[in-house]
Image (spheres, grey):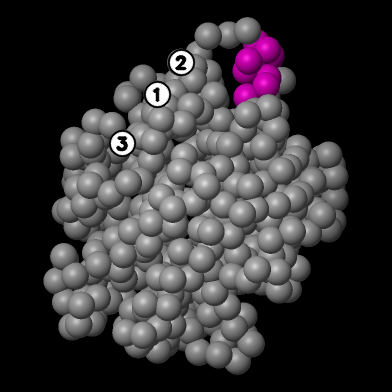
Amino acid sequence: MTNYNFLQPTQLRNGVTIKNRIAMSPMTEMSSFEDGSITGDEIDYFRLRAGGPGMIITGCANVNDLGKGFEGELSVAHEKMLPGLSRLANAIKLNHTKAILQIFSAGRMSNSRVLRGHQTVSASAVAPERLGAETPRALSGEEIEQTISDFANATQLAIDAGFDGIELHGANTYLIQQFFSPHSNRRTDHWGGSLEKRMNFPLAVVDACAEVIKHSDNPHFILGYRISPEELEKPGIRMADTLALVKELNQKPIDYLHMSLADAWQGSIVDRNDQQPLIEKVQEVLADDLPLMVVGHLASPAQVAKLIDAGVQFAAMGRELIREPKWVQKVEAGDEKAIRYTFSLRDLDELKVTPPLLNFLRTAFKKGFPISTDERQIRI
Ligand SMILES: Cc1cc2nc3c(=O)[nH]c(=O)nc-3n(C[C@H](O)[C@H](O)[C@H](O)COP(=O)(O)O)c2cc1C
């Protein structure tokens, strides 16, 4: 048994003990059924990774049908998803690993094919800056209220399914972030127009989900919130906006704050002259009792230990836990030499990596997912 700092238990803000400081970062497997219900392949994938990390956060699950962002995405939009979600929660909750369901709406980061002919929706009718992007329609006031209720309903379903918590996906340019962003939110009503008003939707979603938890039979249900601290768009989210949001989130009953970063130690992506790590800027304003979770190219025990030494409570790991499902167990056993840092196509079955997930990794997430030389020999 090794005694790395990240193997020590810790507590979330609501007092729930997490057995170690490792979280599996939310990663969709693109492998759900067309209606968003879980497949056996996905259950197998999570079961293989359960038991090691203190928390496993699932890939994003849409809270309503218009929130679907891509094919193979998980859904928590309807009661009928409950049996599948229960299987998922059960598969993860092995050896005290906490099961966290990430919930979201894709908003304008979708398209009319995925939405079966429907136009995408967002805070305002502004297309994302990417090739071939469709222009969304702005949600009406009534639809915004309904969307907030959909997040609350999804929270209730997650509780009923036996999850230990949810994570609100306020990052990676999806709907919650779209309301916070001055690029996608050009509204002039209660939901936009100033920095304060752009926070109204994210904060209303937090309040609605917290209310469900408070009145549930599991008041220790975990509520996490994921942010992306900056956007490149002009106008776009800048660090000053994010620090203002963090100060508001400090006041809310959330149990951890999760920073979505490409590299855990990255400086500003907007101002290349300012390379102070963004995590330090957030730590300066974060409430003392609100745990921080950070992700981004963490692979070796030394990298994770350094992050925890810097006062970050949780290290989230994504691609490394795809290629090495037993990362935590191997570190615990002092068997670090056995940790895999590259991925071989020969291990697809063993690692329960489905073809759609592999395809996604080889396109959108190639950097940071080194595939061994087998790649040149095998055609798939
Ligand atoms: C295959 C894949 C799917 C992902 N899906 C999600 C997702 O559903 N929700 C989310 O917030 N982030 C998602 N991400 C981003 C990861 O959570 C993480 O932030 C990113 O991979 C960087 O961490 P890493 O360097 O440890 O892989 C995904 C990443 C990958 C590789």
Q: Would you place residue 316 above or below residue 118 in this image?
A: above
The crowding category of the residue bearing disc 3, from other C-alpha atoms within 10 Å (few below 14, some 14 to 19, many at least 20), is many
In the image, 219 versus 101, the foreground residue is 219
- Report if residue 336 lies within the magenta region: yes
**Mark 2 C-beta to ligand 1 under 8 Å:** no
Q: Which residues are magenta?
A: 328-337
In the image, 368 versus 59, the foreground residue is 59
Q: Amino acid at mark 3?
A: Leu
Are circles 1 and 2 on residues that touch, CB within 8 Å? yes
The quadrant the N terminus occupies is top right
Q: Amino acid at mark 2?
A: Asn
Reading the image, the residue beneath label 1 is 308
Q: Amino acid at mark 1?
A: Ile
58 with respect to 39 (left or right): left
Measured Cα–Cα span from mark 1 to mark 2: 7 Å
Q: Would you place residue 76 above or below residue 292 in this image?
A: below
Reading the image, the residue beneath label 3 is 290
Number of the front mark, 3 or 1? 3
* Image quarter of residue 194: bottom left
Are circles 3 and 1 on residues that touch, CB within 8 Å? no
220 with respect to 326 (left or right): left
Please report the residue visible at 85 percent of the width from the left and 45 percent of the height from the top. Answer: 349
In the image, 344 versus 301, the foreground residue is 301
Measured Cα–Cα span from mark 3 to mark 1: 15 Å
Reading the image, the residue beneath label 2 is 5
Please report the residue visible at 64 percent of the width from the left and 63 percent of the height from the top. Answer: 74
Q: Would you place residue 301 above or below residue 241 in this image?
A: above
Please report the residue visible at 50 percent of the width from the left and 33 percent of the height from the top. Answer: 298
Please report the residue visible at 56 percent of the width from the left and 30 percent of the height from the top. Answer: 54
